[in-house]
Image: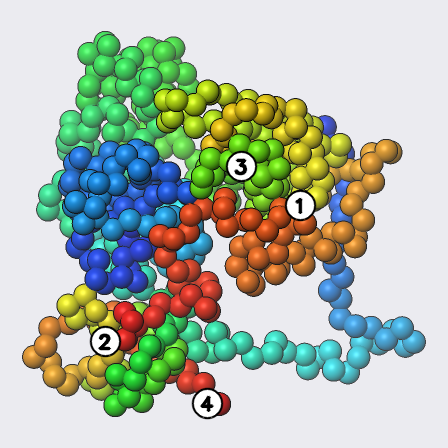
Amino acid sequence: MIAMVDCNSFYASCEQVFRPDLWGKPVVVLSNNDGCVIAANKEAKQLTHIPMFEAVYKIKHILEKNKVTFFSSNYTLYGEMSQRVMNILGTFSPNVEVYSIDEAFLDVDGMAHLDLRAYGFRIKEKIFRYTGLPVGVGIAPTKVLAKLANRLAKKQEGHDQVYIMDTEEKRLAALQWAKIGDIWGIGRNHVRRLNAIGIYKAIDFVKLPLAWVRKEMTVVGERLWRELRGEPCLEFTTVPKPKKAIGTAKSFGQKLPDLERIEEACAYYISEVAEVLRAQKSCATYVQVFIVTNYHSKVDKQYSKSKTVKMPIPTNDTFALISEARKALHHIYKPGYRYKKVGVNLTGIIPQEYVQGNLFQQLPETSKKELIRTFDRLNIKFGKSSVASGMIGTRIEEWELIKRERSPRYTTQWRELLKIGRSG
Amino acid sequence: MDSPTYGKIQQTSDRHAPEVSKQTGFPSAATHYMEMPIDLHKELAIHKDATFYIRVDGDQWKQHRIFHNDVLIVDRSLQSRFGDLGLVVQDGEFKAMRIGFGEEEEYVLWGIITYIIHYAR
Ligand SMILES: [Mg+2]
């Protein structure tokens, strides 16, 4: 059996742990630069007129009228809280597959002697007691079914956030309950195709002939079909896959049309992603840069363009990446537009030990490597981007997310600890 | 991710061998006695996944010897015992209180205060 543990409204819950004044109240979390609503808790979702992924300035009046508290995303906090949850899950099973920041699969095969329902409740209660975060637990014979069991645990009344799909009757009942789009891995296109031939429920999908599924939905669809029938097909991967691409793109706080400022922002993002690259001990082969105008605007001229360049040798050196990205940016930049967003993507990610210097290009000399390492250490110690390459300039605040509504980094910064008492 | 286009060369890893005397080839006598320096987080945050540091503003809890600017170490994993100093939530606000006294008031226990860090200078 496999357990799927998923935190409830994770981002909003992380904020609420430290804000008891907001317990039971609507909370939403906005994307970087307060662009869009990316997470909402149960209370906020009940106000059905809060559209997800909507630009916040369009719905600010709704949020204010309904006394919804909103936060800019605080990924430092969410990441640290996530780490706690995953550590605790490690005490329940030797095999934990971290699937996302707030979800993990647990191999529960050795636990057959246990009362699985009691086991599920122990997971839920321990995580809540240790971290203050609410979770749902679904346990079923396959990953896809465990994901579905988790959905039942949360959406159906009376399960108290824990659902064990341990009989054939329960499996069939769940498939009868679930719409095809509720199934993990079935995307919008497949939902449309399946609806077109009269398939709406998961139960109808598993009754389709395998040959049809294989032909229309490839081997991916076949695996889902088998998993839903209780046959495990998706392997358990406890080692996180190295990222194939690392990128970041953020909107400017205000529209910034001139090249110099875009350059600075671009350099800053590169320094962010290069840090991730070095932390996972890998190098990037390509760097892609893109710029976009404000597509929400009805009056401005629109333009967007991207360019990918190959690095002379795969690298994680901030300075080398910045210099190539800058050339790419000069290539695509056209004056006269009001740019809203610049982004960078590093692709062709390979392990650092695979990198070979070529005849014309020396590997970065040790002293430079030392410098970069120090740079990362300082950033960890003092918080992100306190130290940055010279090109980044001093106007970081402008693009470094609008942090006004960002909560303190309660668990990683001594100067930002939760404060209680007179002020609290 | 494997990438056949790049020949694999192993970088020499940082040397972490114990110090060996260049003259004699014997490890220094101190090597066997090396230990990690004291790490307060390890000592004071017993259940690290359940421990939070929280700063106090004001002297309203001085009867519990909690003073302005102190940092509380709060362990959420502990079951409360009579007489524990608890960090509780009442009417949406944090409060420090002795568990077992004044029980008529309703509260939610947030965690147990295990240490109070006070700057003495
Ligand atoms: Mg979740």
Marks 1 and 4 belong to one chain: no
- In the rendered image, which residue does mark 4 sit on? B120
Front: mark 4 or 3: 4
**Which disc number belongs to residue A247?**
3
Q: Quadrant of residue A231?
A: top left
Amino acid on which the number 2 mark rests in the picture: Lys
User: Are the residues flagged by discs 4 and 3 in contact, CB closer than 8 Å?
Assistant: no
**Residue to which mark 1 is pinned:** A391
Graded by Cα atoms within 10 Å as few (under 14), some (14 to 19) or many (20 or more), the crowding at tag 2 reads some
Query: Could you tell me which chain the residue with mark 2 belongs to?
Result: B
Q: Give the number of the mark in front: 1 or 4.
A: 1
Give the CA distance from mark 1 to mark 4: 43 Å
**Residue at 42% across / 19% down in the picture?**
A219
Question: Which class describes the residues within 10 Å of circle 4: few (<14), some (14-19), or many (20+)?
Answer: few
Against A77, residue A100 (above or below) is: above
Is the distance from the Cβ of mark 2 to the nearest ligand 1 atom less than 8 Å? Answer: no
Q: Name the residue carrying label 2.
A: B95
